[in-house]
Amino acid sequence: MNLTETLSKLESLGEEKVRAMHVKNGARENIFGVKMGDIRTLAKKIKTDHALALQLWETENIDARLLAILILKPKALSAEQIEQMVASENFTWAADWFYNYVVKEYPEKEQFREKWMNSGNIMLARAGWSLTSGRISRAPEGINIASILDRIENEMPKAAPEIQWTMNTTLAQIGINHPDYRERAIAIGEKLGIYRDYPVSKGCTSPFAPIWINEMVSRQK
């Protein structure tokens, strides 16, 4: 499939209720409203097509970008391309797909972590904190956790909502995975109160860090 054919197919799969839902949740108007399952099915049909993926990304259409993420070759992207792509996508759903399918799988992702955490670009900073959260939960060697907690305590109240989300995840992962810092992580969460009143569906865990930490720690016993 070429670019025109792929965009036509995506447009034909679009549903207004899906589109409206995404726009309500922060998506820009350049979106058809294709169900995630249909995007995955189309990606399986196309298989890997890195050149097409880059063309789809350049359209800035959200459905096209989600499809692009599934058919590109992460290792074929340069560090500069990855940084530009992260910075250019401000719809958090698509940004999280790119993080999970591309950034997290990139062999040399550590080069981005501190640079992005200190970036003035909201989406780069968001991804930088995601990388830090991953390091804290899976490979914390070399991470100054006390310093990270200081930053969260001082910076999260004034951070953009997009960054607050991944900073909060970092805070929760510290409390869940590092008993020596658990009490302080919970205290910071209580002090800041971010997501204290976040609506949660029945059976789901609140993103409010003290609740999240205590719930996950209880499951470890």
Image: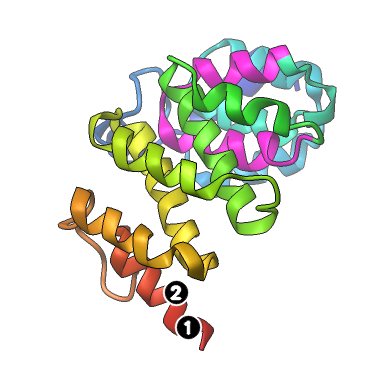
Asked which quadrant contains residue 25, the reply is top left
Check if residue 86 falls in the magenta segment.
yes
Q: Visible in this render: residue 44?
A: yes
Per the image, the residue denoted by label 1 is: 219
Q: Are marks 2 and 1 in contact (CB under 8 Å)?
A: yes
Callout 2 amino acid: Met
Asked which quadrant contains residue 80, the reply is top right
For label 1, count other residues whose C-alpha is less than 10 Å away and answer few (under 14), some (14-19) or many (20+): few
Q: Which residues are magenta?
A: 80-106
The residue depicted at 71 percent of the width and 22 percent of the height is 53
Helix, strand or loop at disc 2? helix
Q: Visible in this render: residue 57?
A: no
Q: Position of residue 82 (x, y in %)?
A: 67, 20
Callout 1 amino acid: Arg
Mark 2–mark 1 distance (CA, rounded to whole Å) = 5 Å
Q: Quadrant of the N terminus?
A: top right
Q: Seen from this angle, which residue lies furthest bottom? A: 221
Check if residue 21 falls in the magenta segment.
no
